[in-house]
Image (cartoon, grey):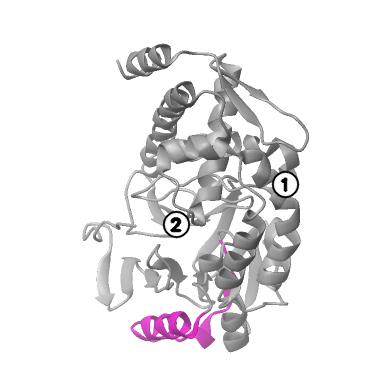
């Protein structure tokens, strides 16, 4: 993942891993050990210091956080509140270590409390109902073993946090009230945080400044897994109304005009959907996984599940437009049947760009 350089007009580097965004508010990029590179956590100083997100939970990540906080005369033990944008490992894995070191209150969206309390246990509980959904997308039976190995790797640094609880409706601090909005899509429980008096939004991975993220599979959807793309688009529609507020994302530097960036992500999804229509027309009867391969390549990695789910969502929207048909037979992958010839799909794509 290529990350753009910090914008000196929006943030000032004051330490090796410490960027000042506003008085008392800082971006701290922490190492993950994964291909995604660093993950941002956000620190709000004051009478009751607040940390947003955690890093992976590795000793390297915790030490980097403590060293960064020292730049402004703080340490991990000073944190009083820990709030999480979502419960992917790089954003929640350190909750147990941070809570143990500081005694802070820990809060995450209600749907992800169990995962923060025990990441591996909660993830394994979701894995088995996830397997038939993945097979509907076109993955073969070996995917279960791949998924277990990947989960073991991801969960290796996660630290259980038994004290984790649900986000309150708002949090009163000496620096102003912190509020949040529910924006499911990149995960089933993404939230945006606002801090009273600051013209910024902590977005987690819901909106990133440099890449378009894919929607996560929500096991609660069951066989209707493809609806998660529309949920994400609805959430981006809300975020697009936030105008010129500053975006503070899970990866990459601070960026301006959050609303415009959300609109740009919707436009990128529209372009991907047109490309998906052309892939479907050229492949003939195919699975969501095969469409994802046509768009993103077939290298097996964690993101492939999200790519396949995104393409299943495009197929669902294209079916509503009469571009394809999705056929379902019990025990077999869902089959996407093109209703356009390759020439018709190419022309429709060209017309959409005009």
Mark 1, mark 2: which one is toward the viewer? 1
> What residue is pinned by disc 2?
197
- Residue 336 located left or right of residue 299: right
Q: Report the front residue among 202 and 150.
A: 150
Label disc, if present, on residue 302 of the rendered structure: none
Label disc, if present, on residue 132 of the rendered structure: 1
Residue at the image position 58 percent from the left and 83 percent from the top: 97
Residue extending farthest left: 8
Q: Position of residue 60 (x, y in %)?
A: 43, 83
Q: Report the front residue among 78 and 260.
A: 260
Q: Position of residue 128 (x, y in %)?
A: 74, 56
Q: Whole-Å distance between the Cαs marked 1 and 2?
A: 47 Å
Whether residue 118 appears in magenta in the rendering, the answer is no
Instruction: Choose top left, top right, bottom left or bottom right for residue 279.
Output: top left
Q: Report the front residue among 16 and 216.
A: 216
Residue at the image position 38 percent from the left and 71 percent from the top: 28
């Amino acid at each position: 993942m290529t990350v753009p350089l910090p914008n000196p007009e929006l943030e000032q580097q004051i330490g090796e891993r410490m960027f000042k965004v506003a008085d008392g508010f800082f971006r701290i990029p922490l190492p993950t050990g994964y291909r995604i590179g660093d993950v941002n956590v956000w620190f709000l100083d004051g009478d009751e210091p607040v940390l947003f997100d955690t890093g992976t939970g590795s000793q390297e990540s915790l030490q980097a956080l403590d060293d960064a906080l020292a730049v402004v005369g703080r340490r991990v033990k000073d944190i009083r509140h820990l709030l999480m944008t979502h419960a992917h490992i790089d954003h929640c894995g350190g909750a147990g270590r941070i809570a143990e070191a500081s005694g802070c209150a820990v809060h995450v969206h209600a749907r992800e409390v169990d995962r923060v309390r025990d990441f591996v246990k909660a993830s394994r509980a979701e894995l088995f109902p996830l397997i038939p959904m993945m097979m509907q997308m076109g993955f073969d039976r070996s995917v279960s073993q791949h998924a277990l190995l990947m989960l073991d790797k991801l969960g290796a640094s996660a630290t259980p946090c038994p004290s984790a609880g649900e986000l309150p409706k708002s949090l009163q601090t000496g620096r102003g009230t912190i509020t949040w909005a529910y924006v499911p899509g990149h995960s089933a429980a993404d939230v945006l945080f606002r801090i009273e008096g600051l013209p910024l939004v902590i977005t987690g991975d819901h909106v990133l400044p440099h890449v378009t993220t894919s929607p996560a599979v929500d096991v609660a959807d069951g066989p209707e897994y493809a609806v998660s793309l529309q949920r994400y688009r609805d959430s981006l529609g809300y975020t697009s109304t936030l105008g010129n507020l500053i975006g503070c994302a899970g990866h990459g530097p601070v960026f301006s005009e959050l609303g415009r960036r959300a609109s740009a992500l919707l436009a990128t999804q529209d372009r991907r959907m047109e490309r998906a229509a052309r892939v479907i027309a050229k492949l003939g009867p195919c699975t969501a996984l095969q469409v994802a391969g046509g768009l993103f390549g077939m290298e097996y990695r964690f993101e492939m599940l999200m790519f396949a789910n995104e393409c299943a969502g495009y197929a669902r929207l294209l079916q509503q437009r009469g571009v394809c048909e999705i056929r379902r037979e019990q025990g077999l992958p869902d089959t996407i049947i093109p209703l356009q010839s390759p020439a018709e799909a190419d022309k429709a794509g060209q017309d959409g760009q005009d």
